Image: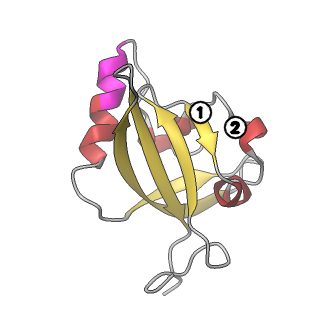
Amino acid sequence: MPGGSTMNGLCGTMILDGMGKICGCGTAAGQLFGGNFADMAGKPISALIADLEVGSAAHSYGARRLAYLCRDSDWRRFKAVDLRGNGFAVELTVAQMRTQDGMDMFLLSLRKPELS
């Protein structure tokens, strides 16, 4: 991938529902967090990336928070933890999708930042 060092050249992906729960995870994203989809299914993304706290009593709040992050395609840096509790930096972009039944879903593209 030009212009960016990632996990062995890969950019990982996750799918979140409007409440920020993980409902899909590619192999590379699983490796980034030290597991696989089965290890992360149903967990809130905030368990891995605290600053992505989107869960609340209202589904629409979570969806609005994630949609706010979709306003441009810039990579944003966050502090993350893997499934063993080890901290690391991660960069991500967010894209909004809508299911046929009108539910908001979000695609996260994730990568480790370049070392400077």
Q: For this view, does 90 lie left or right of residue 59?
A: right
Q: Which residues are magenta?
A: 58-63
Judge by depth and name the residue closer to the eye, 5 or 17: 17
Residue shown at 73%/59% (left/top)? 31
Badge 2 amino acid = Met
| In magenta stretch: residue 19 | no
- The three-letter amino acid code for the residue at tag 1 is Cys
Q: Position of residue 8 (x, y in %)?
A: 68, 78
Residue 71: x and y in percent read 21, 50
Q: Residue at x 76, y 47 (%)?
A: 36
Q: Which residue is denoted by mark 1 in the rendering?
A: 23
The circle drawn on residue 66 is none
Q: Nearer the viewer, residue 24 or 69?
A: 24
Q: Is residue 42 above or below residue 67?
A: above
How many numbered discs sit on the rendered protein?
2
Mark 1 is surrounded, within 10 Å at the Cα level, by few (under 14), some (14 to 19) or many (20 or more) other residues, namely some
Residue for badge 2 = 40
